[in-house]
Amino acid sequence: MHEASIMQSALEEAERHARERGCTAIHLVRLRVGALSGVVPDALEFAFEALKAGTMAAGARLEIEAVPARAFCQVCQREFTLEDAVFPCPTCGGWESELQQGRELELTRLEAS
Ligand SMILES: [Zn+2]
């Protein structure tokens, strides 16, 4: 499972940050997950529950911040939300759009003590 290895590295990153701050327990981990990141949030949560045992995050909560995919059309100079990685502009039908957000996959918040 792809999400398990992603969660494994997110947990390692969280532990590294917590340790740098002299903390011993992680309480909250928040991840930003873009709609086009290729990751299923439910699978991430499942992986978190399975992998956190025995780590500093054993008692931690996971928060997932879902980021919708948005693109900017060069022709209409408008931003629009897209459902998929393939995105003609809904206004002009053009393909001159640039992805603005939606591929995020990052640790954005950590609470530890
Ligand atoms: Zn357009």
Image (cartoon, grey):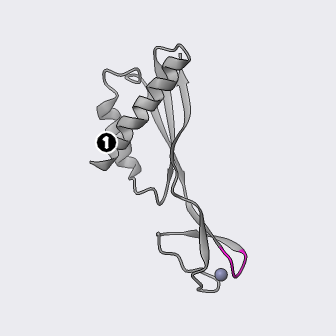
Q: Does the closest atom of ligand 1 sit within 8 Å of the Cβ of label 1? A: no
Is residue 22 or residue 47 the one in the foreground? 22
Residue visible at 71% across and 80% down in the picture: 76
In this rendering, is residue 108 above or below 92?
A: above
Dividing the image into four equal quarters, which quarter contains ligand 1? bottom right
Q: Residues within 10 Å of mark 1 (few under 14, many from 20)?
A: some
The main secondary structure of the magenta stretch is: loop
* Residue 28 x, y percent position in the rendering: 50, 28
Residue type at numbered disc 1: Ala
Q: Which residues are magenta?
A: 73-77
Residue 89 is left or right of residue 77, and the answer is: left
Residue linked to disc 1 = 4
Residue 74 part of the magenta-drawn span:
yes
Is residue 58 or residue 95 the one in the foreground? 95
Q: Quadrant of residue 99?
A: bottom right
Residue 112 part of the magenta-drawn span:
no
In this rendering, is residue 57 above or below 41?
A: above
Residue visible at 35% across and 22% down in the picture: 55
* Residue 34 x, y percent position in the rendering: 51, 54
Residue visible at 47% across and 60% down in the picture: 36
Residue 2 is left or right of residue 63, and the answer is: left
Element type where label 1 sits in the image:
helix
* Residue 46 x, y percent position in the rendering: 32, 41
Is residue 58 or residue 9 the one in the foreground? 9
Residue 40 is left or right of residue 74, and the answer is: left
